[in-house]
Image (cartoon, rainbow, N blue to C red):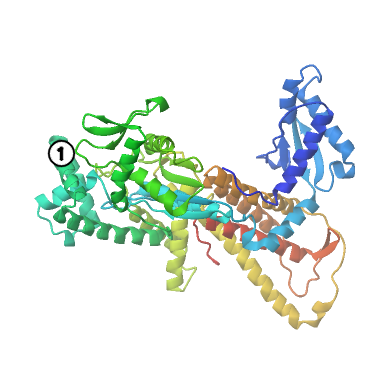
Amino acid sequence: MDINKFVADIIKDQLTKAVQEALQELGIEATVVLEHPTEGTHGDYSTNVAMMGFKKVPGEWKSPMELAEEIVGTIKDKDTDKEGGELVDKIEVAAPGFINFWLTPNALLKELDHAQKAGDAYGAGKPDKTMVIDYSAPNIAKPFGIGHLRSTIIGQAIYNLYKFLGWKTIGDNHLGDWGTQFGTLLYQITTKKLDVNRLTIADLEGEYVEFNKMAVENPDLKEEARAWFKKLEDGDPESREIWEKLKEISLAEFNRIYKLLNVEIDYAYGESFYQNMFEQVIQGCVDKGIAMEDQGALIVDLSKNGMPPALIRKSDGASTYLTRDLATVKFRIEKWDPDAMVYETSSEQDLHFRQLFAIVELLGWSSSIQFLHVKHGLYLSPRGKKFSTRRGDTVHLEDVLKEAVERAGKLGKDKDTDTERGGELAKEVGIGAVKYFDLSHHPATNIVFEWEKMFALEGNSAPYLQYTYARTRSVSEKARGLKRDKDKDKKADRPLDSFNIPLNSEELAVLRHFYKFPVVIREAAENFSPNILANFLFELAQKYNSFYNKHRILSDNKTTAKSKAVDGRRESVVEFRLEITQVTGNILRTGLGLLGIQTPERM
C-alpha cells in the first residue's frame, strides 16, 4: 500500500543513487536494496547488491567480496569527502559481500535537530487518501472475551498509524447484532419465560452456553433457533422487543470495556442497520448473473476462484453473514468513497473474506478500492487449545484488565500518595502492559494465554517504556529548575568554555536510532504490523537508559558546562544531552500513543 514519502528517506535515496551510479559505471544491472542491519556493528545501512550483481556477471570478478570492493572504490572515487560525502562517514565490505555504510555524526545531528523542531509531528505524513477500517466487531449478547482484545487494539493501532501518516481514517465497529445466535437466545428467553429486563450480560452468556450443550443431545433445537431468527427478520414484535433489550444490555457492557481500554471508534453500525439493503444486494447478484439457486438457497459459484460456493440467501429466505457484509461494503462505498477498506479480524475468517472480496470484484465494485483482510492469530489456552464461548470455555477480558490494574497498583504502592492519581496510574500501567504484550507480537501469530506473561511489568514491556518516558520528563523538569536557579545567579552570564569533544558511543547509539523512527512508522503501517513499532520503541528505551546510566546529563549552577562544536554551532554538552532526552521522550510518547498506550508523566 502506497504511503507518503518522508524527508528522512532522502538519506536512503542518496545512498541508493550513489550505489546505482557505481553499478552503471561497472556495467551491472541490479536492484539496489538498502536495509537497516540488526547489528549496529554492521553500520546504519547495508546492501547485498554485490552478491546479486555477481550472479549476473559470472567470471568478471572472483567473488562477491571483490565486486563489493570495486563498487565501494567507485563510490569513493566519485565522492572524495569522507568516503561518500557529508552523509557517509565510513563504508566497509563484509563477508560474503555486504556493503555497510556508517552515517556521519553531522548527518545524525541534523536529524536530531529536525526531530526536535518537529516535536510530536516527527514522522507524520500529509493528507492523502481515505481508509475505512473495520475492527473490534463484538457480538451482541456476549461479554468481551480475551479473543476480542486482538481485533480491538490491533485495529486501533492500524487506525492510529494511518491517521498519523495523513490518511483520513474511518473506524467502523461492525457489531454482530444479527444472525442465528439471536434465535438461540430468543428460544431460551421465551421458553423459560425469563424477564429480559433483569438479565445481565453474564446471564445471556450462560443461556447461550446452556442452549449449545442441550443442542449436542438434541440437534433439532438448532432448527428452533433458526425459526426464531427468521421470525426476527420478518419483524415479529415479540422477537424485536427482546432483541432491542439484548442490544441495550450489550452496548452498555461494550462501552464500559472500551472506556477501560481507552478505545474510541468513530462509528458503530450493527449488521441489522443494513437489513433494508439485503434484498437489493441479492438482486444485484442475480442481475449480474453471478447468483444461482441451489436446493432452494441462493449461491455464488466461486469455483473459478478456487473456492467453494458462497451462500447469500438460505433456503428459508434468511440472510447470511456474507449478505450482510456485502450490504456493508455497498453502504461504505456510497457514504465514504474510500481508497482502501481494511478488515481486522481473526485468521479463522480467511475464507469468508476471500469470498466477499471475490464477489465484490464480480459485482464491479472494487475497481478503485483496495480490499484487505488483516488476519490476527488466536489466543490459545495453556494447553494450546482455542477458547470457545459456546463451550463456556473462555477468559473474560474484564477479568484480565482488572487483574492487570491490581498488579500495577501493588507495583506502584507507596510511590504515589495521591490515592486518585495512584489509581489512574495503575490503570495506565496495568492496561498498557496488557496492550503492549499483545501488540509486541506479530498480528498473525497465535498467543498462548499465560497470566504472568500477560502482565509483564519489566523487560520488553509497556511499564518499562512508560518508566523510560517518565525518566525523560523528570530530567527535563530538573533542567527547568536549574535554569530558574541560574537566572538568579549573575555568574551564570559567564561564557561557556568552547572546545570540541567527540560524541561518545552511547550518544551515537541513540542518535543512530532516532532517524529510523519515520521509516519504522511507515513500515509498521505498510505491513499492518504494530509490533514493528513496539520493537523499535523497546530498543530506543534500552539505548537511552544505557546512555542515561553512564553519562551525566545535567550540571548544577556551580559547574561550567562544556561545549560541543556541531556543524558550525556551539552547543553546551548539557543542552545537547537534554535535546537527546527530549527527543527520546517525544518519540516514546508519539510511538506509545500510536499503539494506544498512555504515557504517565511520572511513575
Task: Identify the residue at horizontal 21%, vertical 40% (top origin).
Answer: 317
Q: Is residue 58 above or below residue 519?
A: above
- Tell which of 196 and 322 is nearer to you: 322
Q: Is residue 478 above or below residue 37?
A: below
User: Mark 1: which amino acid?
Assistant: Glu
- Tell which of 344 and 95 is nearer to you: 344
Q: Secondary structure at mark 1?
A: helix
Q: In the picture, residue 59 is in which quadrant?
A: top right
- In this rendering, position of residue 457 left or right of residue 48: left
Q: Residue furthest top?
A: 59
Asked if residue 76 can be seen in this view, the reply is yes
Q: Residue furthest front?
A: 287
Q: Is residue 349 above or below residue 157?
A: above
Q: In the picture, residue 113 is in which quadrant?
A: bottom right
- In this rendering, position of residue 228 left or right of residue 512: left
Q: Is residue 200 above or below residue 210?
A: below
The percent coordinates of residue 325 (x first, y second) are: 35, 44
Instruction: Locate the N terminus by quadrant.
Output: top right
The percent coordinates of residue 602 (x first, y second) are: 55, 67
The residue labelled by disc 1 is 223
Task: Identify the residue at horizontal 84%, vertical 70% (top origin).
Answer: 496
The percent coordinates of residue 413 (x first, y second) are: 45, 66
The percent coordinates of residue 425 (x first, y second) are: 47, 65
Crowding at mark 1 (Cα within 10 Å: few <14, some 14-19, many 20+): some
Task: Identify the residue at horizontal 75%, vertical 78% (top origin).
Answer: 486
Asked if residue 101 can be seen in this view, the reply is no
